[in-house]
Image (tube, grey):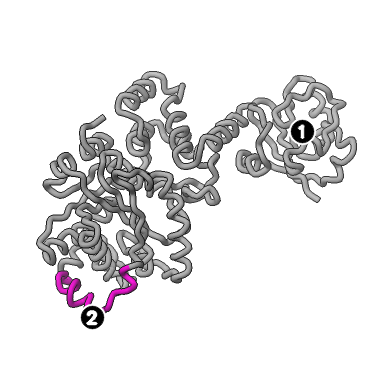
Amino acid sequence: MAQDAFNELKWRGMVYDYNEGLPELLATQKITAYNGFDASADSLHVGHMVPLLALARLQRFGHHPIALAGGGTTLIGDPSFKANERTLLSYAQIEANVDAIKVMLGRFLDFEVKSNPARLLNNADWLTKLNLIEFLRETGKHFTVNYMMAKDSVKMRLEREEGLSFTEFSYMLLQSYDFLYLYDHVGCVLQTGGSDQWGNITAGAELIRRTRGGQAYSLVYPLITKSDGTKFGKTESGAVWLSADRTSPYKFYQFWLNTNDRDVINYLKYFTFLPQEEILSLEYSQANHPEQREAHRMLARVMTRLLHDETALQRSEQAAQVLFGGELNGLRAADIEEIFSDVPSARLEKARLEGAGLNVIDLLVSSGVAKSRGEARRSIDEGGISVNNQRVSDSARFVSLNDAIDGQFLVLRKGRKNYHLVRIEG
């Protein structure tokens, strides 16, 4: 492992830009650092794991991390590299979002360790109490309009027809004030964030220099992109969230398991705490035996266990094996619906499965797995039909409600990979 936090982050490819003197500071002192998290949704997403895990790495090297929930700044909306102005949320919505985010932060940061416990703060606690006139006199006077307009995030919006409202234009001042407030009250000297936040972060450090004569530092991480150029953390079904209610553990597991071969080693560096030696070993395996997908499976296992728990990991691994003929025992209806969300499906009235049930041949025909009774019988005789991944050997077999998973689903398979989901209704 690297000897200090900066070199650890650098080896993992997490250093995009920083102030002169920061490497020496992190190597010789234990400092307080913070990263802000937007509260525009009731869940963080996988993109937030970059700064979250970076804070966790700083903590593991003895530094003092602060996760700052943007309960106040979210009332304004960050314009950084956004095409259009955000819809403003209500106070109640933002407060509920902050409460939900707090739970997720605890999966990554240690709030109980005695030496350097993590802290969770909400900038609404001070921003909503600001007096406008005093704020403009004491903070606003240190920012020229020329300086603010020179920032890339502002220039991009000014070039659009929609322009930039004064509300969003003031965001930089509020974020800078956050840094000043934390510098004054908890001795925070480092702000971190994504590379799109460089202008806001350095503005805060400059405010501290001008008003307090103090030295503050900035560190930004690269914005993670996929090797194919598409946005990291996005799938065909949308964003990958940290909340199990938004993205199930199975879907979360699958997201990492399906990582592009060209990205998997970088993701192991960015998102896991695996030591360098183990990652280098996985890199060797990926280069010489890519068909084994050892690195992909490790990434999916580590990330699912980190965010959820061992039970969720085991269920996710079991669910992943189902598509290859694995056992369905113990899986719930919700698991089945997710696993087979993309396969053809048919609906079947519950009454047809009551009592003795429905002959398997009639089931195959009515669900569309076989075009005729003759085709269904031949498929069974050839050993090519399974119900709930159990091979059917007798064409006289009946399928009843006792076979239904949670009384809601039957999983039919023809051949090795042709699945069909039967939804039981009524």
Residue 311 place in picture, x, y as percent: 55, 36
Check disc 1 and report the residue beneath it: 370
Residue 382 place in picture, x, y as percent: 76, 20
Give the residue type at disc 2.
Ile
Residue 290 place in picture, x, y as percent: 42, 23
Give the quarter of the image for residue 132: bottom left
Q: Is residue 315 visible?
A: yes
Q: Which segment is the magenta one?
A: 126-145
Check disc 2 and report the residue beneath it: 133
Front-most of 299 and 371? 299
Residue at 23% over, 42% down: 15
Left or right placement of residue 389 versus residue 93 in this view: right
Residue 424 colored magenta? Answer: no
Give the residue type at disc 1.
Ala
Front-most of 205 and 355? 205
Secondary element at tag 2: helix
1 or 2: tag closer to the N-terminus:
2
Left or right placement of residue 45 versus residue 362 in this view: left
Mark number, residue 167: none
Residue at 85% over, 31% down: 398
Quarter holding the N terminus? top left
Left or right placement of residue 272 versus residue 330 in this view: left
Residue at 86% over, 36% down: 358
Residue 358 versus residue 174 in the image, above or below: above
